[in-house]
Image: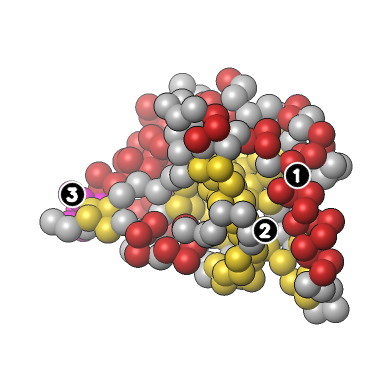
């Protein structure tokens, strides 16, 4: 049984350049998701991530056993927002809201993933958590690969919003999106690899 790796097969989505933003068209993609708020690394955040991976591996094993299709579980992703977006530059993490995500293969429909969610809820330390299936269509985006700690993202995001977007006649239209290519539990902060993605549209569009 061959194993599909969506990061490898869709490199334009998962291999942006370092040091500059590249434009990419992101199609509609299906995810398992959990919403929350507050500081990354908190107990609620850790439980959300645990639930996501439990459900994602349940989906993988169901795909192998029932559909004879295997794949690499995708990395953790996050959508981040706040009533005051400057809190991302000042790193006031207690004021952040988030939706943590793990992408699922296109051949797993919502009913199939619902079975994986129920299996995850049975194993989760927080069975009441709202773990669900969502579809995200971001379309036109700018993205870059950030090397280093999460707290060093501020200047890169400031450059995007204060200089790059205005210079190209663009505006942000969706939530700040991060894709975590490294496991922060095992990789030193200075070696972390994170895709920073921002959906955009023309100012006059």
Q: Residues within 10 Å of mark 1 (few under 14, many from 20)?
A: few
Give the residue at mark 3: 65
Any part of residue 33 in sight: no
Does residue 93 lie above or below 16 as drawn? above
Q: Is residue 15 left or right of residue 171?
A: left
Dominant secondary structure of the residues highlighted in magenta in the image: helix
Give the residue at mark 2: 198
Residue at the front extreme of this rendering: 19
Residue shown at the point (68%, 37%) measured from the top left: 152
- Magenta span of residues: 63-68
Q: Position of residue 168 (x, y in %)?
A: 78, 72
Q: Is residue 40 left or right of residue 29?
A: right
Give the residue at mark 1: 155
* First along the sequence among labels 3 and 2: 3
Any part of residue 164 in sight: yes
Q: Secondary structure at mark 1?
A: helix
Within the image, what quadrant is residue 139 found in? bottom right
């Amino acid at each position: 049984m061959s194993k599909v790796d969506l990061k490898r097969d869709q490199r334009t989505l998962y291999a942006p350049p370092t040091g500059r933003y590249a434009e990419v068209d992101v199609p509609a993609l299906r995810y398992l998701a959990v919403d929350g708020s507050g500081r990354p690394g908190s107990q609620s955040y850790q439980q959300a991530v645990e639930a996501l991976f439990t459900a994602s591996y349940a989906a993988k094993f169901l795909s192998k056993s029932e559909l004879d299709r295997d794949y690499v579980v995708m990395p953790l992703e996050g959508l981040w927002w706040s009533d005051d977006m400057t809190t991302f530059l000042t790193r006031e993490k207690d004021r952040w809201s988030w939706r943590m995500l793990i992408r699922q293969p296109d051949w797993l429909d919502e009913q199939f993933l619902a079975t994986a969610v129920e299996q995850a809820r049975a194993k989760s330390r927080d069975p009441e958590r709202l773990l669900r299936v969502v579809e995200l269509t971001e379309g036109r985006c700018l993205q870059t690969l950030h090397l280093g700690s999460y707290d060093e993202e501020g200047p890169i995001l400031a450059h995007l919003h204060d200089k790059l977007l205005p210079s190209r006649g663009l505006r942000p239209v969706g939530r700040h999106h991060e894709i975590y290519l490294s496991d922060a539990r095992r990789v030193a902060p200075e070696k972390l690899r994170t895709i920073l993605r921002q959906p955009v549209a023309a100012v006059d569009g």
